[in-house]
Image (cartoon, rainbow, N blue to C red):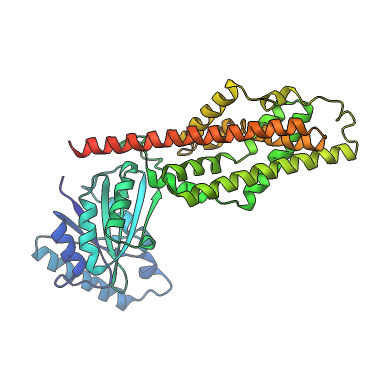
């Protein structure tokens, strides 16, 4: 299929000595010149009859010059913000549902080189080069398959493009339903890494949610109430630093791994402290008169000792959590992670507040083993997934 470029004509309506037009003609089989008739300028506050007449006359001359070269310009009403998208809907361009949007800002003298490189990469579609107002910078936009994300980012690094000059953002396509399908199982290391960086910091919202989870779980432990325990696990956001830690270990980004572990440890400590303070408050105020008489077994059996099921549950939770970290299911699957962390953390706080240090130490040991098992299975899952994706990419490259 012949490649197509769109050249957005703005102030410079020359056909000769027009760098973007020359670059597009050299790199693509089909070039679509587009000029945008913005209704804001034609009928807005600063509308001018003579200026509009002059602009239309210039467009007629442009059209004549293009026709003399067996071409014609597309002139259509649209706002400036809509122009690239409007032009991309031109007949002959195939609709598709892709996963990511690419935006690249490069100097004009490198625009041809980088655009041609991207155009030749599998999984990169519908590139549009738009010169900036000063003509010194060209903004290149396009669409990238999720599976091609790593290749595009690596290519940008190899071409020494500054990280601040290119961006990939996720695009969720809801309509139309037709077009090329994108596999939901596609893996992108840079997407996972970006999400891990974002969730590895101990923000105030994270500590607030951990405190709420600790308070709810403390009542659930004292009352032996499974519903409250599940509610606390649903509130807890500890899935995020656990998965971010696994990403840091797989990518050998030790600072990311350590920061994520610190965030997780501080959050679990905060939950235990809140659970202990909440228990002590209930005890001092006699809001729960039977508090000391109630055994903290039942739910506590999850954290009172370590057996083969403790480790198996934590390993399974780590696998599910790591797989869900890349999807929108992370909030729901986070409960599977929290079942190994939040009850134990709250149990530690409750046991200390009730003066049962031996049970607190037992719960702390279970918590440590669970976190280690989560990190082990999550890291192994991501490592296998990353290597499988790399092997698949190599097979496609040799076809």
On screen, residue 147 versus residue 322, left or right, reads left
Residue at 42%, 36% (x, y): give it: 382
Nearer to me, 63 or 360 = 360
On screen, residue 88 versus residue 65, left or right, reads right
Residue at 33%, 47% (x, y): give it: 150
Image location (x, y in percent) of residue 52? 30, 73
Nearer to me, 200 or 374 = 374
Nearer to me, 348 or 52 = 348
Q: Report whether residue 18 is seen.
A: yes
Residue at 68%, 36% (x, y): give it: 345
Image location (x, y in percent) of residue 370? 59, 32
Q: Report whether residue 200 is seen.
A: no
Image location (x, y in percent) of residue 300? 72, 26
Quadrant in which the N terminus is drawn: top left
| 299 relative to 42, above or below | above
Q: Quadrant of residue 268?
A: top right
Image location (x, y in percent) of residue 136? 28, 72
| 164 relative to 16, above or below | above
Q: How many marks?
A: 0
Q: Quadrant of residue 350?
A: top right
Residue at 30%, 42% (x, y): give it: 96
| 133 relative to 366, above or below | below
Quadrant in which the C terminus is drawn: top left
């Amino acid at each position: 299929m012949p490649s197509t470029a769109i050249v957005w004509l703005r102030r410079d309506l020359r056909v000769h000595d027009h760098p973007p037009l020359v670059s597009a003609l050299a790199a693509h089989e089909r070039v679509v010149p587009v000029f945008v008739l913005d209704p804001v300028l034609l009928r807005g506050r600063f509308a001018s009859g003579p200026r509009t007449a002059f602009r239309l006359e210039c467009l007629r001359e442009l059209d004549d010059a293009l026709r003399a070269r067996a071409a014609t310009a597309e002139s259509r009403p649209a706002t400036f913000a809509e122009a690239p998208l409007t032009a991309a809907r031109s007949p002959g361009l195939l609709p598709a549902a892709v996963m990511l949007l690419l935006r690249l800002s490069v100097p004009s003298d490198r625009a041809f080189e980088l655009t041609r490189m991207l155009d030749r990469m599998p999984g990169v579609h519908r590139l549009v080069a738009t010169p900036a107002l000063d003509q010194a910078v060209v903004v290149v936009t396009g669409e990238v398959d999720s599976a091609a994300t790593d290749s595009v980012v690596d290519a940008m690094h190899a071409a020494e493009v500054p990280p601040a000059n290119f961006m990939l953002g996720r695009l969720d396509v809801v309509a139309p339903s037709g077009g090329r399908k994108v596999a939901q199982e596609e893996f992108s290391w840079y997407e996972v890494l970006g999400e891990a960086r974002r969730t590895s910091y101990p923000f105030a919202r994270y500590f607030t949610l951990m405190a709420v989870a600790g308070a709810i779980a403390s009542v659930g432990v004292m009352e032996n109430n499974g519903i409250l325990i599940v509610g606390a696990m649903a509130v807890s956001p500890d899935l995020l630093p656990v998965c971010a830690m696994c990403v840091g270990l797989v990518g050998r980004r030790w600072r990311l791994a350590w920061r994520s572990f610190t965030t997780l440890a501080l959050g679990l400590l905060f939950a235990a402290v809140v659970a202990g303070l909440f228990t002590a408050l209930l005890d001092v105020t006699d809001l729960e008169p039977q508090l000391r008489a109630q055994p903290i077994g039942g739910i506590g059996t999850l954290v009172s000792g370590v057996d083969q099921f403790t480790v198996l549950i934590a390993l399974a939770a780590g696998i599910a959590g790591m797989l869900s970290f890349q999807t929108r299911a992370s909030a729901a699957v986070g409960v599977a992670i929290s079942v190994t962390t939040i009850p134990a953390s709250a149990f530690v706080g409750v046991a200390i507040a009730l003066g049962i240090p031996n049970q607190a130490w037992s719960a702390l040991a279970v918590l440590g083993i669970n976190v280690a098992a989560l990190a082990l299975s999550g890291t192994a899952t991501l490592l296998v997934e990353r290597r499988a994706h790399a092997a698949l990419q190599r097979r496609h490259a040799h076809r």
